[in-house]
Image (cartoon, grey):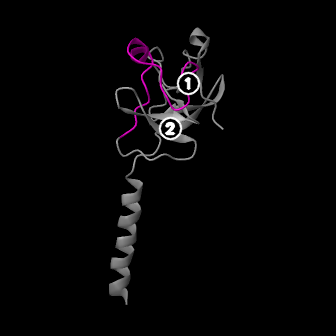
Amino acid sequence: MIRFALPAAAGALLAFSTLGAFAAAPVSTATTPLGTIYVDANGMTLYTFDNDAPNKSNCNDNCATNWPPLAAAADAVPEGDWTVINRDDGSPMWAYQGKPVYLWVRDTAPGQTTGDGVGGVWHVIPAQ
């Protein structure tokens, strides 16, 4: 009986590990003077752009140079409010509640929020 239990347990562990290998949204939260917000895996603040359409990024070329999209892996799996959309060039990026998500090149350290309010159209993403 023990002989069968160990392979079964190993198989269950392998199945669990394989499921965990799919890329989920690489985000967490951080507390800033603006409140608790979403940040990427490196602690860098995430932003949305008012000029985007639902599930459609309108930030390309020079805009995307200054506001890099939060890239999604090819095997990224949507989770809750976090979905994956395709940019005009076909590359996948993360979206939060249908809004494409970006970083800001002038944030140079984790937790900085210098992009909030830029041009009146860029905003941190409050964690909910």
100 with respect to 14 (left or right): right
Q: Secondary structure at mark 1?
A: strand
Q: Badges 1 and 2: C-beta atoms under 8 Å apart?
A: no
How packed mark 2 is, by other alpha carbons closer than 10 Å (few <14, some 14-19, many 20 or more), is some
Q: Residue at x 36, y 46 (%)?
A: 75
In the rendered view, would you say 24 is above or below 1?
above
How packed mark 1 is, by other alpha carbons closer than 10 Å (few <14, some 14-19, many 20 or more), is many
Q: Residue at x 39, y 67 (%)?
A: 13
Q: Quadrant of the C terminus?
A: top right
Q: Does residue 126 show up magenta in the picture?
A: no
| Of the image marks 1 and 2, the number of the one nearer the N terminus | 2
51 with respect to 21 (left or right): right
Q: Position of residue 27 (x, y in %)?
A: 50, 38
Q: Mark 1 against mark 2, which lies toward the viewer?
A: 1
Amino acid bearing label 1: Thr
Residue labelled with disc 2: 27
Question: Could you say which is closer to the camera, residue 86 or residue 34?
Answer: 86
Q: Residue at x 36, y 87 (%)?
A: 2
Q: Secondary structure at mark 2?
A: strand
In the rendered view, would you say 12 is above or below 99?
below
Give, as a single range, the part of the protein colored magenta.
48-73
Q: Residue at x 34, y 42 (%)?
A: 74
Q: How many marks?
A: 2
Labelled disc at residue 70: none
Q: Position of residue 35 (x, y in %)?
A: 67, 27
Residue labelled with disc 1: 48
Q: Does residue 64 show up magenta in the picture?
A: yes
The furthest residue to the top: 119
Real-space Cα distance between discs 1 and 2? 14 Å
